[in-house]
């Protein structure tokens, strides 16, 4: 069998990350696809951790089944955070009078979560603070993080002090580095990690601010040319947002796509140089780009649904991811190793 070797770039996007779960579920069922490198941010880092840890358990079906179990476990745990449990969790962080609690329980938390985070800080909870994602990661069925076996795995976070991207790889991939990648500062305290380069501790926020996800770690010479982006943040929206909520949603999407777009523009530039034969003798990798996406589905949702990981939404996203992977395998799998199937000219034109 002709095996196609690929790298995966997994975007973050809260509950919408279940779309990538569906994509990965389908790829793990495809023996002709071998995943050699993974770069993930935020929810993409959670998906990548489950995938990489599972695949490190062994070759063939053993590793694939372990990865599938990890993914199902993570999203089943995330799915238990219903509207009411989110309310209860927030009340544990921000105590309020009983009457206010009864009132807020009548509404979805998305309606007022933004207002709360402008008044309260994760640091207001004092010694009672916990990050609910930590236990989920530690209790995966196969929590083998930072192992040499399996695909190369990279996690993107943002250094709070410098604002620069920080990519964790190899043994640096721990529960803390994944929590750092998924650390929305309005909800979670910054994650502090020892930095061997500075000799001190650095604080990190969500990687989406600086790389969603970072592609450059996948340029390593020992990794395949093919980079497959699992895109869960819409690049294009035809309608101009006009309501306050819609405007804020689009600002969120644009900011969390900005770093990825910058890397795609750089790749597009290198491709033009290769096409014009202007890189002779220069070690610049001409990567091949592909994407799993469902633009219609993502355009039908708002950024607010990223905060509501109810089981119905997660299952819908998972099923859409499976369908997107099916379409790619049917229409574009033959391009792997040969040519791009992601048309950058759609984003940047042919200038």
Image (tube, rainbow, N blue to C red):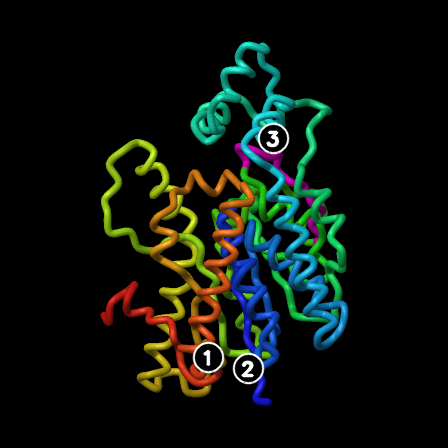
Pointer 2 residue? 4
Instruction: Name the secondary structure under disc 3.
Output: helix
Q: Are marks 2 and 1 in contact (CB under 8 Å)?
A: yes
N-term-proximal mark, 3 vs 2: 2
Vertical comparison of 282 with 351: above or below: below
User: Looking at the image, which is closer to me, 327 or 275?
Assistant: 327
Q: CA distance from mark 1 to mark 3?
A: 41 Å
Q: Position of residue 204 (x, y in %)?
A: 60, 43
The 10 Å Cα crowd at callout 2, few under 14, some 14 to 19, many 20 or more, is some
N-term-proximal mark, 2 vs 1: 2
Q: Quadrant of the C terminus?
A: bottom left
Magenta stretch, residue numbers: 185-196
Q: CA distance from mark 3 to mark 2?
A: 43 Å
Q: Quadrant of the N terminus?
A: bottom right
* Rendered image: mark on residue 333: 1
State left or right for residue 304 relative to residue 160.
left
Q: How many marks?
A: 3
Pointer 3 residue? 85
Instruction: Name the secondary structure under disc 2.
Output: strand
* Rendered image: mark on residue 37: none
Q: Residue at x 53, y 72 (%)?
A: 219
Please identify, in this view, whether the residue under mark 3 or under mark 2 is nearer the observer.
3
């Amino acid at each position: 069998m002709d095996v196609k070797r690929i790298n995966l770039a997994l975007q973050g996007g809260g509950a919408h990350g279940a779309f990538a779960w569906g994509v990965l579920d389908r790829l793990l069922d495809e023996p002709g696809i071998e995943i050699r490198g993974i770069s993930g941010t935020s929810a993409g880092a959670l998906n990548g951790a489950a995938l990489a840890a599972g695949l490190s358990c062994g070759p063939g079906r053993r590793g694939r089944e372990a990865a599938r179990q990890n993914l199902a476990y993570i999203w089943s745990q995330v799915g238990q955070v219903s509207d009411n449990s989110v309310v209860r969790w927030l009340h544990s962080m921000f105590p309020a009078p009983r009457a206010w609690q009864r009132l807020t329980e009548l509404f979805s938390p998305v309606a007022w979560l933004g207002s709360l985070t402008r008044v309260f800080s994760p640091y207001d909870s004092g010694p009672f603070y916990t990050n609910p994602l930590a236990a989920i990661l530690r209790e995966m069925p196969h929590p083998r993080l930072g192992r040499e076996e399996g695909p190369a795995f990279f996690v993107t976070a943002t250094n709070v002090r410098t604002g620069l991207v920080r990519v964790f790889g190899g043994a640096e991939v721990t529960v803390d580095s994944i929590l750092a990648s998924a650390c929305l500062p309005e909800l979670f305290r910054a994650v502090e990690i020892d930095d061997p380069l500075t000799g001190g501790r650095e604080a990190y926020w969500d990687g989406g601010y600086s790389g969603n996800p970072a592609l450059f770690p996948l340029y390593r010479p020992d990794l395949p040319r093919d980079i497959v982006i699992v895109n869960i943040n819409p690049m294009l929206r035809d309608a101009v947002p006009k309501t306050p909520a819609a405007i804020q949603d689009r600002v969120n999407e644009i900011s969390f796509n900005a770093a990825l777009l910058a890397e795609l523009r750089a790749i597009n530039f290198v491709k033009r140089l290769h096409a014009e034969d202007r890189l002779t003798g220069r070690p610049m990798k001409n990567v091949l780009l592909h994407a799993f996406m469902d633009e219609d589905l993502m355009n039908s949702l708002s950024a607010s649904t990223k905060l509501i990981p109810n089981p119905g939404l997660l299952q819908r996203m998972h099923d859409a991811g499976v369908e997107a992977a099916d379409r790619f395998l049917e229409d574009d799998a033959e391009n792997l190793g040969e040519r791009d199937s992601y048309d950058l000219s759609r984003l940047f034109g042919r200038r």
